[in-house]
Amino acid sequence: MTDRIFNIGEGGLEAADERIKSLMNNMVNAETPGFRRTDVVQRAFPLELEAAESRLGGMKPRVEAGYYDYSPGALIRTGNQTDLAIGGDGFFVIEAPWGEGYTRDGRFILNKEGQLMTVSGNYQVLGGRGPIVVPAGSKLEISSVGEVKVDGVLVDKIRVAGISDNNSLAPVSGSIFKVSDPRTQVDDISAPKIVQGYVESSNVKMVDEMMNLIMVSRLYGIDVKLIQTRDGSLSQALEMGKVSQ
């Protein structure tokens, strides 16, 4: 028969391990433009208590799921004419092997064919007419609503898509996503807020992540102590049983 104390301690260690992985991933990518911080959702205590009272479980902590935080990051000036940031809602639309992808990482470059590409993943950036191409040596201007002008001539408009449910986005990386639910509505934003020469920083706040890491580490230590104490108690009980025989 499974010991409930061991079961609870094991669940606590597993949940803490998942949380630590998420926090470490956030901290590693704190300087990655457009990165969205991740966190995990643990099963609510009232649900576990109800299950325990019904003798369906032992109040074992467990991770239900992970999620991405889509709150915006700060805008950082780079001065590069191909760097773009979105000042409001929406995602840049990119062409990827699976179809359309979506990102807030506006670090773009021009390849040797003059195509506007993402730094992360090397995907083509899409406009209303398809991939955006800028001839070598041309002056590129992008207006506050995404209009693309090459040497003063309007050639296209940057596509910025609004996603009806951000929770339906599946991560390809921490800054590039794809729609996982075909029922999700994706519409182009007609008047996006584009800022040329800037990129959006990660929305990770290092101080918060450090505080969370300290808290989770302490909880991990408590679970380890719980298991060690229980193991010691059971060992003593076994020894006492041997003596009484």
Image: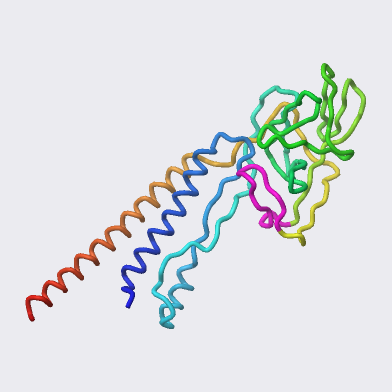
Q: Position of residue 10 (x, y in %)?
A: 36, 63
Q: Residue at x 79, y 42 (%)?
A: 160
Q: Position of residue 41 (x, y in %)?
A: 52, 60
Q: Residue furthest front?
A: 97
Whether 95 is among the magenta residues is no
Q: Residue furthest top?
A: 137
Q: Position of residue 241 (x, y in %)?
A: 12, 77
In this view, 156 is above or below 114: below
Q: Position of residue 116 (x, y in %)?
A: 78, 30
In this view, 125 is above or below 136: below
Q: Residue at x 92, y 25 (%)?
A: 153
Corner quadrant of residue 174: top right
Q: Residue at x 72, y 26 (%)?
A: 197
Q: Nearer the viewer, residue 152 or 101?
A: 101
Residue 42 in the figure: left or right of residue 141: left
Corner quadrant of residue 76: top right
Q: How is the image coloured?
A: rainbow
Which residue range is magenta in the image? 165-180
Q: Residue furthest bottom?
A: 54
Whether 172 is among the magenta residues is yes
In this view, 152 is above or below 14: above
Residue 123 in the figure: left or right of residue 222: right
**Quarter of the image with the C terminus in it:** bottom left
**Quarter of the image with the N terminus in it:** bottom left
Give the number of marks: 0
Q: Residue at x 67, y 24 (%)?
A: 78
Q: Nearer the viewer, residue 85 or 97?
A: 97
